[in-house]
Image (cartoon, rainbow, N blue to C red):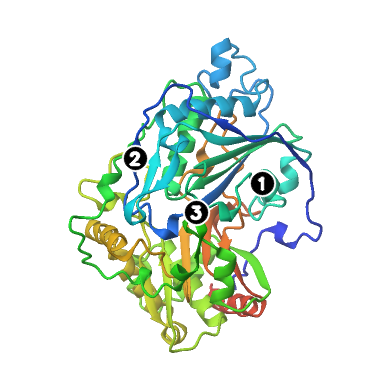
Amino acid sequence: MVKLQAPDHEHQSSPLVFTVRKAEPELVKPVKPTPRELKPLSDIDDQQGLRFRQGAILFYRAAAAGSQSGMSCGPATARRCCNYDKVVVDLDPVKVIKEAVAEALVYYYPWAGRLIEGADRKLIVDCTAEGVVFVEAVADVKLDQFGGDHNLRPPFPCLEELLYDLPKSAGVIGCPLLLLQVTRLKCGGFTVALSATHAITDAIGLVQFLNAIADMARGDMAPSLLPVWQRELLNARDPPRPTCTHLEYEDCSINNIIISNNIIDHDQLQLQLQPPLEMVFRSFFFGPTEISALRDKVVNPAVPQSCSTFELLIASLWRCRTIALNIDPNQEVRLLFAVNARPKFNPPLPQGYYGNACAFPAAVSVAGNICRNPLSYTLELIKTAKESVTEEYMRSVADLMVIKGRPHFTVEQTYLVSDITRLGFSEVDFGWGKPAYGGPANNGSVPDVASFFVAFTNSKGETGKLVPLSLPAPAMEIFVKELQELLDNHA
């Protein structure tokens, strides 16, 4: 039998409490003059479902004395004063990163602008060079208090103190596109937390921008990967002509609760989709043993070898979740999952393109079929949806956005999943080495709607995926039971 695993910090009884002192927010502008121009987003970028800010946080340990973290010349500030012997130890990460942001914005200058809305709700970046928001902070807490090497995972306590953000009601129009907070910790480590407008970039593009800041922080003269705008590559055709079926945008009641400034009120959305219930958060670890156990449950012998770990995992989660929610057997349910479409194009999108280039194909079935059929049934639905993502599919999505008024993807009876374990958040090195944690700032779960997978190493040293999930309390009990049954009887 394979026993479900959860990180140790979920069993801790006493919550971590600490104090953060913040300086006043300031605007960091490009260090050199940048073009003043209007840059329209693509028709993939400005869909309603991406008009919000995505949060991420990175935790860094203090550098050991004499450490240069493998740098050839050290952070930019060190290089300017030719002080190589104490490169990391004697430098202030706040100063280094702040200067690096200003330098990176010379190349990524649209980030320093503001969004405006044109005809037919078209989003455009007004490249004003007003800057991004930067906050300096100090916390009376050590990094290890957030969890040891095998427990540093969301949800993080007092997150609102580590991540400066605007209220949801502020929307995205006319607001700073990026907000950064660098917080020094008692141990000499620090955190870099950010809130970035999703319409500007997807997670892949966001990591690209963070790496550009890191390049400048380590003393490089320019980003190792230069940015490519070219949002016209993902614009609708003229005339727009959707050619594919897009179940992910069908019957979306969320479009009826858009509040001011074109942003969704997610609290109101939650009330509309289901009655207010006590929500329970849990995260589940899936390493080699768990994945092997799930493969044993696939009835069709042809499927195990042809399906990816991600496909197998989301099929299992969707099935258990559908059973747990006790949905009407005749009710249609959806699984949406993020697919990077960059390599689907011929030729592929250029290296350095940092706009949104992900599709969210939908696997659709009535709940009864998901619950009654073997796991191989759900797997085939997922594989078919995934294989539908082609260049033509993306062209069709862009066309649909223009024709339908840039709708939000459907969320009613929908489970949305995204695997960010390989996107590179855990590789961003500002000169202090790789982060002890890099990924979503919140718990990685939108209550009863979405899960974002993060990389995790358990106490046994096994590497796998940590899957966060929020469900009503009664449903969570059933979900755990169903998932455990899938894992049982494994040799």
Rendered residue at 54%/69% (across/down): 269
Query: Where's residue 221, x and y in %?
Result: 43, 20
2 and 1 marks in contact (CB < 8 Å): no
Q: Earlier in the sequence, mark 3 or mark 1?
A: 3
3 and 1 marks in contact (CB < 8 Å): no
For discs 2 and 1, the disc positioned in front in the rendered view: 2
What's under tag 3, amino acid-wise?
Phe
Query: Where's residue 479, x and y in %?
Result: 59, 76
**Left or right of 16 in this view: 192:** left
Q: Quadrant of the N terminus?
A: bottom right
2 and 3 marks in contact (CB < 8 Å): no
In the displayed structure, would residue 366 be above or below residue 34?
A: below
Given the current orientation, which residue lies at the most extreme left position? 239
- Name which quarter of the figure residue 312 lies in: bottom left
Q: Which residue is mark 3?
A: 52
Rendered residue at 48%/71% (across/down): 294
Query: Where's residue 231, x and y in %?
Result: 30, 44
Q: Earlier in the sequence, mark 2 or mark 3?
A: 2
What's under tag 1, amino acid-wise?
Asp
Q: Which residue is mark 2?
A: 39
Q: Which is nearer the eye, 88 or 353?
A: 353
Q: Which is nearer the eye, 251 or 4?
A: 251
